[in-house]
Image (cartoon, rainbow, N blue to C red):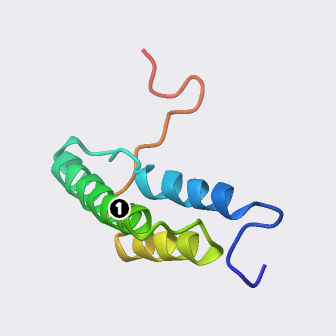
Amino acid sequence: MSDGTETGLSPVHDLLAAIVDMIDVPRPEEYSEQPTYYRLLEARASMLRGYLNAMVERRREPAPYHAVGIREMTADLPVTYRPYTRPEDGEGTC
């Protein structure tokens, strides 16, 4: 859709989907990347809290551009490490 929402979703549902995407930060594969993971999660949560707080204070109804704004913030804070992937059945077992 041209308004940035996923096809057929209400602005509220699209906003919630964008929020989930922003805070769904994958765990790193390497233990040494844990601090990077936590910094990213904290940065995203902080930005999201400010964005949502501004919506509440201004008494804004969710609109398509709100989800777009959250997705842009998510893109500005990308995952920079290799995410953990679950082994396939039988891999990595003794």
Query: Residue 85, how many percent across, how many down?
Result: 47, 42
Question: Residue extending furthest bottom?
Answer: 2
Compared across the picture, whether 50 is left or right of 84 comes to: left
Mark 1: amino acid? Asn
Query: Residue 43, how many percent across, how many down?
Result: 25, 61
- Judge by depth and name the residue closer to the eye, 51 or 45: 51
Q: Which residue is mark 1?
A: 53
Q: Quadrant of the C terminus?
A: top left
Query: Residue 13, how many percent across, how many down?
Result: 67, 55
Query: Residue 62, how many percent across, how many down?
Result: 59, 66
Residue at the spot 76% in from the left edge and 60% down from the top edge:
9
Residue at the spot 71% in from the left edge and 81% down from the top edge:
3
Residue at the spot 58% in from the left edge and 32% down from the top edge:
88
Q: Looking at the image, is 29 positioned above or below residue 94?
A: below
Residue at the spot 40% in from the left edge and 44% down from the top edge:
84
Q: Quadrant of residue 80?
A: bottom left
- Judge by depth and name the residue closer to the eye, 84 or 9: 9
Q: Looking at the image, is 88 positioned above or below residue 1?
A: above
